[in-house]
Amino acid sequence: MVPTPVGNLGDMTYRGVEVLKSVDLILAEDTRTSRVLMQHYGITTPLQSYHIFNEHQTVAGLVERLLAGTTIAVVTDAGTPGISDPGFLLVREAVKAGIEVECLPGATAFVPALIDSGLPCDRFVFLGFLPHKKGRQTALRELADEQRTMIIYESPYRLVKLLEELSEVVGSERRVSVSREISKLHAETARGTVEDVLTHFKQKEVKGEIVVILSGKE
């Protein structure tokens, strides 16, 4: 499992490049996105598509190939495989089959967003993407009494709606930090109350991957 940069290509580790060059096959969430990274580092290892829409159908065949001696690396479009991205299913089945699995240390979006937020990071809970429809209201209500710092992933198209929902559920004065385009040229972190940050993002077009850091209940 090889983490890839969430923004700046320079964030790739030396060891990550070495592994991608040495394996027999690279499973990529989007081969077009991953090919840019591979070309940048001169990696010519074959790529195969592996994403949430085909992982259940392909996992048995991949485990068979691993058992037969094929070495495989898994990458996603950005960050660490398995963190709100494909990877967990293959790891689970590989472990069941007695196959050695190793995840390299490396980039993941929520760590820099958490540190940059200025909110307590000694105890936190990672929530990933909240449900879009079924179960969303229940998930939102559970945030109100959570005392740990909360980490939420969100689409730029739904960020304003999420902040409006948070204002209703946890209150407009709760502290929040929103990071986007982490490690890229136009990286931004907006901090303040939910009301402050909501006003900020209502006044602009929101782009890039979003990490929301919400303070816990005092």
Image (cartoon, grey):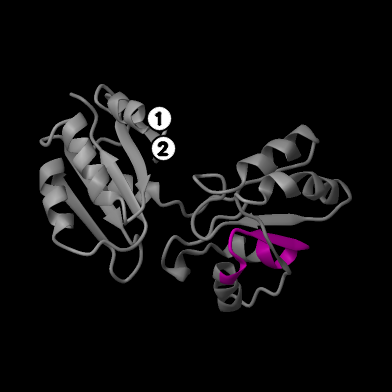
Q: Where is residue 43 shown, x and y percent of the image?
A: 66, 73
Could you say whether the residue bearing mark 2 is in a helix, strand or loop?
Answer: loop
Vertical side of 72 occupied by 214: above or below = above
Q: What x and y, as percent, mark residue 58?
A: 74, 49
Tell whether 103 sits left or right of 95.
left
**Amino acid type of the residue tagged 1 in the rendering:** Gly
The front one of 99 and 63 is 63
The tag on residue 135 is 1
Q: What's the residue type where badge 2 is placed? A: Pro
Membership of 184 in magenta stretch: no
Residue 201's place in the image compared with 196, above or below, is below
Instruction: Say if residue 85 shows up in the picture.
Output: yes
| In-front residue for pair 158/125 | 158
Residue 80 spot, x, y in % from top left: 53, 51
Q: Which residue does the numbered mark 2 point to in the structure image? A: 131
Count residues near mark 1 (Cα–Cα under 10 Å), then give few for <14, some for 14-19, many for 20+: few
Taking the spot 16% from the left edge, 56% from the top edge, the residue there is 202
Tell me the SS state at disc 1.
loop
Q: CA distance from mark 1 to mark 2?
A: 6 Å
Q: Is residue 114 left or right of residue 80?
A: left
Q: Position of residue 66 (x, y in %)?
A: 81, 49
Q: Are marks 1 and 2 in contact (CB under 8 Å)?
A: yes
Q: Nearer the viewer, residue 166 or 71?
A: 166
Look at the image and give the residue range highlighted in magenta: 19-32
The relative height of residue 150 versus residue 107 in the rendered view (above or below) is above
